[in-house]
Image (cartoon, grey):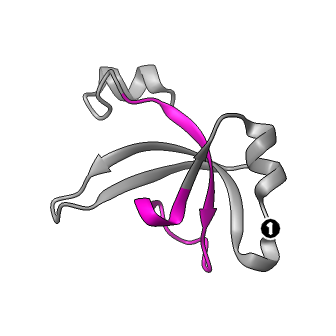
Amino acid sequence: MSDYEFEQQGLLPADLRESYAVIYAPRRQRQRYPENTVQVVATEQEALAQADAEKNMFAARVCGPFRSSEGFKLYYLVRWLGE
């Protein structure tokens, strides 16, 4: 789903956009990741260059951050890159 579709459905505030990131993910089963496991980067190439599967660091496209009901900031996985 695109940013526009998220905005139209009221799921994504207009000031938040998708970003490229490197995520520390020992298990890639989640759809949301806490802020301390996500490193936002400028480009897809930068995310792919910093990815290291041996260290459980994976390139991804994310949306966020959003504040959870517990007060944590979360990023939502849009898709994994380089697969």
**Quadrant of the rendered structure where residue 43 is?**
top right
Q: Residue 28: image x %, image y %?
A: 61, 71
Q: Secondary structure at mark 1?
A: loop
Q: Is residue 83 left or right of residue 16?
A: right
Q: Is residue 66 left or right of residue 27?
A: left
Q: Tell me if residue 57 can be seen.
A: yes
Q: Residue 78: image x %, image y %?
A: 55, 45
Q: Residue 5: image x %, image y %?
A: 41, 24
Q: Is residue 39 left or right of residue 7?
A: right
**Residue pictured at 32% horizontal, 32% vertical:** 12
**Residue pictured at 38% horizontal, 30% vertical:** 16
Q: Tell me if residue 34 can be seen.
A: no
Residue 54, compared with residue 67, is above or below; it is below
Q: Which is more toward the observer, 28 or 42?
A: 42
Can residue 35 be found in the magenta stretch?
yes
Q: Which amino acid does the dot numbered 1 rest on?
A: Asp
**Quadrant of the rendered structure where residue 22 is?**
bottom right
Residue 72, compared with residue 41, is above or below; it is below
**Residue pictured at 70% horizontal, 75% vertical:** 56
**Residue pictured at 51% horizontal, 27% vertical:** 2
Q: Residue 42: image x %, image y %?
A: 66, 34
Count of marks overlaid on the render: 1
Residue 53, compared with residue 59, is above or below; it is below
**Quadrant of the rendered structure where residue 72 is?**
bottom left
Q: Which residue is mark 1?
A: 52
Can residue 24 be found in the magenta stretch?
yes
Which span of residues is magenta-colored? 16-38
Q: Residues within 10 Å of mark 1 (few under 14, many from 20)?
A: some
